[in-house]
Image: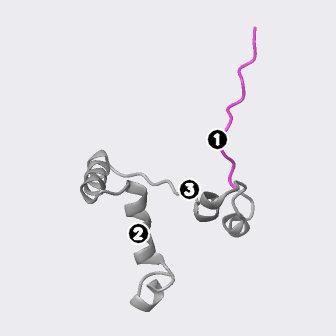
Amino acid sequence: MTRPRPTSRFAARPGAADAWVREPDSRTGSVAEYTARLTIDVTPVLRGRIKITAFERGITVAEMLRTLLEREFGDGAADRGAAP
C-alpha cells in the first residue's frame, strides 16, 4: 500500500509580512522594476465589463487598472484624501 502524498501549499505565508512586502522582486529587467503581482477576485460580470472597457479605450486591462490604481493610491493620493 502506498502512503498518500502530503498536501502541499502553493505558497507559504511569510513570517514577517512587512519585510516580505518591501522585499524587491527577484526577477530582472525593466519590467521587473515596475511590476509586483496583485491578484483580486471579481465576479465574471465585472471582469467582462473591465475587459470591454479596456478594449473600447484601445488599451490593455493591465494598463487601465495601473492607471486607476496610480490615480487612487499614487504619490499624490494623500493630498486628495485617499488612503495612504
| For the residues bearing labels 3 and 2, Cβ distance under 8 angstroms | no
Residue toward you, 10 or 57: 57
Provide residue 37's location: percent of width, then percent of height: 56, 56
Q: Is residue 54 above or below residue 7?
A: below
Provide residue 35's location: percent of width, then percent of height: 58, 60
- Per the picture, the main secondary structure of the magenta-coloured stretch is loop
Q: Which segment did they paint magenta?
A: 1-13
Query: Which residue in the structure is indicated by mark 2?
Result: 67
Q: Earlier in the sequence, mark 2 or mark 1?
A: 1
Q: Quadrant of residue 36?
A: bottom right
User: Could you say whether the residue bearing mark 3 is in a helix, strand or loop?
Assistant: loop
Q: Is residue 75 above or below residue 53?
A: below
- Disc 1 marks which amino acid? Phe
Query: Which residue in the structure is indicated by mark 3?
Result: 37
Q: Nearer the viewer, mark 2 or mark 1?
A: 2
Query: Which residue in the structure is indicated by mark 1?
Result: 10
The crowd level at tag 3 (other Cα within 10 Å; few <14, some 14-19, many 20+) is few
Q: Quadrant of the N terminus?
A: top right
> Does residue 1 appear left or right of residue 47 in this picture?
right
Q: CA gap, disc 2 to disc 1?
A: 30 Å
